[in-house]
Image (spheres, rainbow, N blue to C red):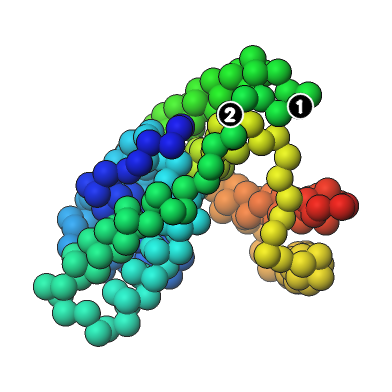
């Protein structure tokens, strides 16, 4: 991944990707409206959401919290109703310009060499695995989106869109891991949150699961059952992740 600075053009494209995802996936905005807010064609927004327009060298920046925070700020401004249509593109450009100007001050310092107990060759092997995994996940995203476009009903499209979304998220996670691996960092702990907050979230998840388990109604099958099971599997995974976070994700745990 390295520390190469991002050009203004790359910053604009990356921010467009993140704002599009924030609007559609985070705020529930329709793809067509998101395209109008960003001054883009609906097809471009669809490709941003599927990952087709997300080049490998830009992927690490989509996992950068500075870019994510700026995307949320831009989305807030675009949805605030105070930006004239002619100025909407300028909002994204200004955000990208700010990110580029701050890059030198915010970029993490790279620690050269392997940490104690971690041979340099092991780190290189992990880095190669990360790059290969990112390519694999991106290929899965493209393949699933092609199948979603080919499908003739909404539920079939939903199945492949979910897999594509998961694969894109996996690629972003690996990109985040790569940032740490490039620094020779093999251990990291949660910051900015407390164990109490995690426990409260666990309780909320458990309550939601119990309500779902108690709900009756007719038996559903086929794709309806498949999609519902995928949601339940996600909830079970979330529970395991949160329990593991409490057990080993905090310093001194």
Which residue is outermost to the left? 86
Residue 169 in view in this figure: no
Q: Total marks drawn?
A: 2
Q: Which percent across, then down, holds residue 227?
A: 58, 51
Q: Residue at x 47, y 48 (%)?
A: 107
Q: Which percent across, then down, holds residue 23?
A: 37, 66
Q: Secondary structure at mark 1?
A: loop
- In the rendered structure, the answer to whether residue 228 lies left or right of residue 210 reads left
| Of the pair 155 and 184, the residue shown nearer to us | 184
Relative vertical location of residue 79 with respect to residue 212 in this rendering, above or below: below
Q: Residues within 10 Å of mark 2 (few under 14, many from 20)?
A: few
The quadrant holding residue 51 is top left
Q: Residue at x 53, y 42 (%)?
A: 109
Residue 219 in view in this figure: yes
Q: Secondary structure at mark 2?
A: loop
- In the rendered structure, the answer to whether residue 133 lies left or right of residue 85 reads right
Q: Residue at x 22, y 79 (%)?
A: 83
Q: What label does residue 112 carry, if any? A: 2
């Amino acid at each position: 991944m390295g520390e190469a600075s991002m050009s203004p053009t790359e910053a604009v494209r990356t921010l467009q990707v993140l704002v599009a995802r924030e609007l559609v996936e985070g705020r529930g905005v329709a793809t067509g409206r998101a395209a109008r807010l960003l001054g883009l064609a609906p097809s471009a927004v669809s490709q941003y959401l599927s990952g087709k327009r997300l080049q490998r060298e830009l992927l690490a920046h989509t996992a950068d919290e500075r870019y994510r925070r700026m995307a949320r700020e831009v989305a807030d401004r675009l949805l605030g109703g105070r930006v004239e249509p002619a100025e909407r593109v300028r909002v994204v450009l200004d955000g990208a310009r700010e990110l580029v100007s701050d890059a030198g001050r915010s970029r993490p310092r790279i620690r050269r060499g392997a940490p104690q107990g971690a041979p340099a060759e092991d780190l290189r092997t992990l880095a190669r695995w990360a790059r290969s995994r990112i390519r694999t996940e991106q290929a899965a995203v493209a393949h699933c989106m092609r199948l979603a476009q080919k499908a003739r009903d909404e539920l079939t499209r939903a199945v492949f869109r979910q897999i594509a979304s998961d694969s894109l998220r996996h690629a972003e996670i690996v990109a985040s891991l790569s940032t740490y691996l490039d620094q020779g960092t093999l251990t990291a702990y949660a910051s900015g949150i407390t164990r109490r907050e995690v426990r409260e979230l666990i309780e909320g998840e458990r309550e939601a699961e119990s309500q779902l388990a108690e709900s009756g109604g007719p038996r559903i099958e086929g794709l309806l059952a498949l999609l519902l099971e995928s949601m339940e599997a996600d909830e079970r995974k979330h529970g395991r992740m949160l329990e593991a976070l409490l057990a080993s994700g905090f310093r001194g745990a």
